[in-house]
Image (cartoon, rainbow, N blue to C red):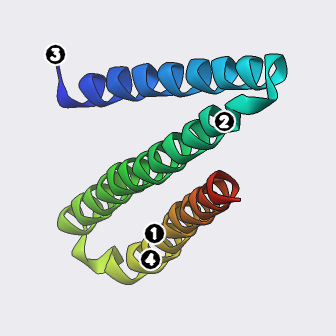
């Protein structure tokens, strides 16, 4: 199994675990008011998964974008300025999505504390 398939399968497994644990925590919180700890612990777990998934996805996307740009520059060195500028813009946009995942993780962590 290739590394890409392994990452996709493990990401799908983590997403499934995260959504089912959040649904179970919400169901238990609706049944009894004393299980607020379960909801908060699920939110803390979701915060960890959110930042991990954001970092993993951003890293893979930036690696692929950089590899494709360097491959294009290696094939045609004269096109380096026309390739490098959009690549840097793309990397900045990918990084902004990682930072958005970081902000969401902070919101979830704040929910888990409060």
Q: Nearer the viewer, mark 3 or mark 1?
A: 3
Left or right: residue 93 versus residue 68 is right
Contact (Cβ within 8 Å) of mark 3 with mark 4: no
Q: Which residue is mark 1?
A: 91
Callout 2 touching callout 3 (CB < 8 Å) = no
Mark 4 or 2: the one toward you: 2
Q: Position of residue 104 (x, y in %)?
A: 64, 58
Disc number for residue 39: 2
Disc 4 is placed on an element classified as helix
> Viewer-nearest of labels 2 and 3?
2
Nearest to N terminus: mark 2 or mark 1: 2
Residue 68 drawn above or below residue 12: below
Q: What residue sits right under mark 4 in the picture? A: 88
Q: Is 89 above or below relative to 68?
A: below
Seen at 18% across and 66% down, the residue is 74
Of the numbered discs in the image, which one, if any, rests on residue 1? 3
Of helix, strand and loop, which one carries label 1? helix
Closer to the observer: label 2 or label 1?
Answer: 2
**Looking at the image, is mark 3 or mark 4 nearer the viewer?**
3
Helix, strand or loop at disc 2?
A: helix
Task: Label 3: state its secondary structure.
Answer: loop
Instruction: Give the distance between the C-alpha atoms of the residues marked 3 and 1, in whole angstroms.
Output: 28 Å
Q: Are marks 1 and 4 in contact (CB under 8 Å)?
A: yes
Look at 49% across and 41% down and name the residue there.
45
- N-terminal of the pair, mark 3 or mark 1, is 3
Around disc 1, counting alpha carbons within 10 Å, would you say few (fewer than 14), some (14 to 19), or many (20 or more)?
Answer: some
Q: CA distance from mark 1 to mark 4?
A: 5 Å
Report if the CB atoms under discs 2 and 1 are less than 8 Å apart. Answer: no
x and y percent of residue 78 in the render?
29, 79
111 horizontally vs 31: left or right: left
Task: Find the distance from the CA under tag 2 to the CA under tag 3.
Answer: 36 Å
């Amino acid at each position: 199994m290739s590394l890409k398939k392994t990452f996709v399968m493990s990401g799908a497994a983590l997403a499934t675990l995260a959504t089912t644990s959040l649904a179970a925590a919400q169901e238990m919180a609706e049944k009894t008011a004393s299980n607020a700890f379960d909801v908060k612990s699920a939110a803390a777990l979701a915060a960890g998964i959110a930042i991990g998934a954001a970092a993993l996805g951003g890293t893979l996307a930036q690696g692929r974008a950089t590899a494709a740009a360097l491959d294009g520059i290696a094939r045609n060195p004269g096109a380096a300025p026309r390739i490098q500028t959009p690549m840097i813009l793309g990397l900045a946009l990918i990084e902004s999505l990682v930072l958005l995942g970081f902000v969401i993780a902070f919101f979830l962590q704040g929910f888990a504390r409060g």
